[in-house]
Image: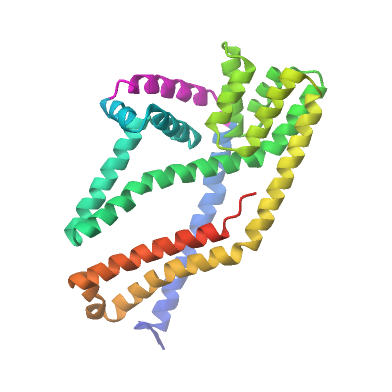
Amino acid sequence: MNWFGLETGYFLGLLAVFAGMASLAYAISSLVVDPLIQKHRVHQRIKGNKRGSEVQAQIFKAYQESKESLLLNLLEGVLGWGKVENLQRQLLQADIYLNPGVFLSIVGISACIGFILGATFSNLTGGGIAALVLGMLPVMFMRWKKRRKAARFEKAMPEAMELLARSLRAGHTLGSTIEMVSLEVPPPLGTEFRITYEEQRLGLSLPQALRRMGERVASQDLRYFVTAVLIQAETGGNLAEILENIGGVIRERMMLKGKVKGLTAEGRFSALILGFLPVFTFFVLLYLNQSYVMLLMTDPLGKQMLMGGILSIVLGALVMKRMVTIKV
């Protein structure tokens, strides 16, 4: 019996080799890689997350020096300096330790590479589309990292709020409880709390340090915490009870997000299938009848149809993503 021209024994042998390699990779990951990662995390927590403070200081220094950059001076004149400051804030929220000039240079280089490749294998229109796609990749990566950091941050927020509330009830000051959270909670929440503690210890007021932490993390739950502490500092009240209530609200929002994710799973899976099915069909046809598919590569009209199809797939995926995305 043959499968795609392969004998049954040969096919089963390849399958066995693949299964063995997968099992070996899983064993190495479980027995070697995971313990090393856990050991590294414990070591980072013992160090008190000092690297985060050092990196923030280096970024602040680079940001001050970048004000003399020709590129950023040009952007300041065209877009306004507030746009550049917003980009710097988003880079910090994504844990990308670059100043805006370097990041924009990476975007420009990526767009140039895309234009050269597109113009070489297609035409100027294809080059423009490829330049747009490759130029957007660094921006999409930044936004993905920002969302990932915010999700990890919010996941640890309820536990941190409860720890803060218990420490305040035990008689600790807010500054010492923030230090305790920075040592007990893993990154990125522990790192940000450590930076906040060091900033207020070195001269900033606690409200200023908390506002700066709110700017470094794109989290609505963190804004609840910062706002509650700032209001309590002005008006007084039982901060421990407020933090417990915030922790409960955050936990309920996480449960609601999980329900929404489950209810929209069908739509997200449909978008995934509709996005990858044309690509899979293209490669299957390329394998079965290469001369038939190569018309899309050689004929000018075929190139335009191929670019149009790719653009339609991308736009369709974005539209379906917007349809199944519910903000809570």
Q: Is residue 287 visible?
A: yes
- The x, y position of residue 313, in whole percent, is 40, 65
* Quarter that holds the N terminus: bottom left
Residue that appears at 69% across and 57% down: 259
Q: Report whether 72 appears left or right of 302.
A: right
Residue that appears at 55% across and 63% down: 268
Q: Is residue 291 above or below residue 297?
A: below
Q: Report whether 6 appears left or right of 301.
A: right
Decide which of 4, 199 is in the foreground and name it.
Answer: 199
Location of residue 79 (image quadrant): top left
- The x, y position of residue 14, in whole percent, is 41, 72
Q: Report whether 131 appears left or right of 233.
A: left
Residue 44 falls inside the magenta stretch: yes
- The x, y position of residue 64, in whole percent, is 38, 19
Decide which of 168, 114 is in the foreground and name it.
Answer: 114
Residue 38 falls inside the magenta stretch: no
Residue that appears at 22% across and 70% down: 297
Decide which of 75, 195 is in the foreground and name it.
Answer: 75
Chain part drawn in magenta: 43-69
Q: How is the image coloured?
A: rainbow
Residue that appears at 29% across and 65% down: 307
Location of residue 156 (image quadrant): top right
- The x, y position of residue 236, in whole percent, is 78, 19
Q: Is residue 23 visible?
A: no
Q: Is residue 14 above or below residue 235?
A: below
Q: Report whether 284 appears left or right of 191.
A: left
Name the magenta segment's main secondary structure: helix
